[in-house]
Image: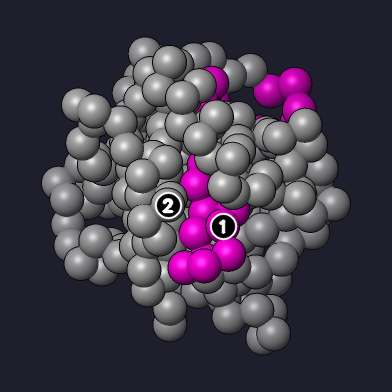
Amino acid sequence: MNYRHEWKHEISYSDLLSIRARLRAVARADPHAEGGKYFIRSLYFDNPVDRALREKIDGVNMREKFRIRYYNFDTSLIHLEKKSKLNGLGTKFSAMLSAGEAQNIVDGDIGWMLDAADRPLVRELYCKMRYQQMRPKTIVDYTREPFIYGPGNVRVTFDYDIRTGLGGTDFLNPDCPTVPAGDAPIILEVKWDAYLPDIIRDCVQTPGRRVGAFSKYAQCRIYG
């Protein structure tokens, strides 16, 4: 299990312009990004007492969250993901889903998940849905600009235009209604493995900005 370091900063639009210009001089855009950016849609899960949300807000040291995700409205490539945090470090597990399987999960048709022997994460979500009553909670949409830097396996991203589906879970419908998630900031995320190269550290430095613990899922739950 490989845990990665992660910084999150809430930044302004002028910060984004400055950092982006510096990154373009030393890092490269993610080759999967179209025009330097891509759209992300996620569907987050929680239980009836909002355990994932409460643990995030309360800063619980060991926590996890489940989500289903796809990019640029391409439902031919859908990921089930579990993100885990321990002592401030993060790791992610992933499994592929078909559009039909994702829709079944949204609809509560989960019996088939127990037979997914080749995808242990699918079976784990089945157990959480069966015995902890975990259910789809809300859609989270946003735009991401990603940069990568080889040494240290560094990934730097800007996330903005964060929108919430409120209580809606029509995950595969590109026209499902979403609204701005309050006054959500632009989020700068920096992730790396064993070390963060000084050149990247210098690029992302912004006076007056501190490392935070912003959660797009929590932001998208501000209306309930």
Residue found 24% across the figure and 40% down from its top: 212
Which of pointers 1 and 2 lies earlier in the amino acid sequence?
Answer: 1
Q: Is residue 61 left or right of residue 153?
A: left
Q: Quadrant of residue 33?
A: top right
Q: Amino acid at mark 1?
A: Tyr
Give the residue displayed 53% in from the left and 14% down from the top: 179
Marks 1,2: beta carbons within 8 A: yes
Q: Is residue 159 magenta?
A: yes
Residue at the spot 40% in from the left edge and 60% down from the top edge: 197
- Label 1 crowding class (10 Å Cα cut-off): few <14, some 14-19, many 20+? many
Tell me: 126 left or right of 52.
right
* Residue 199 - label: 2
Query: The magenta stretch spans which residues?
Result: 148-176
Report the residue marked by disc 1.
149
Q: Nearer the viewer, mark 1 or mark 2?
A: 2
Q: Classify the position of the C terminus by image quarter.
A: top left
Graded by Cα atoms within 10 Å as few (under 14), some (14 to 19) or many (20 or more), the crowding at tag 2 reads few
Residue 185 lies in magenta, yes or no? no
Residue 34: x %, y % from top left? 79, 36
In this view, the residue in front, 171 or 161, is 161
Residue 57, horizontal then vertical, whole percent: 20, 42
Q: Nearer the viewer, residue 213 or 189?
A: 189
Q: Secondary structure at mark 1?
A: strand
Q: In this rendering, is residue 150 above or below 103?
A: below
Q: Is 224 rendered above or below residue 8?
A: above
- Tell me which amino acid carries mark 2: Ile
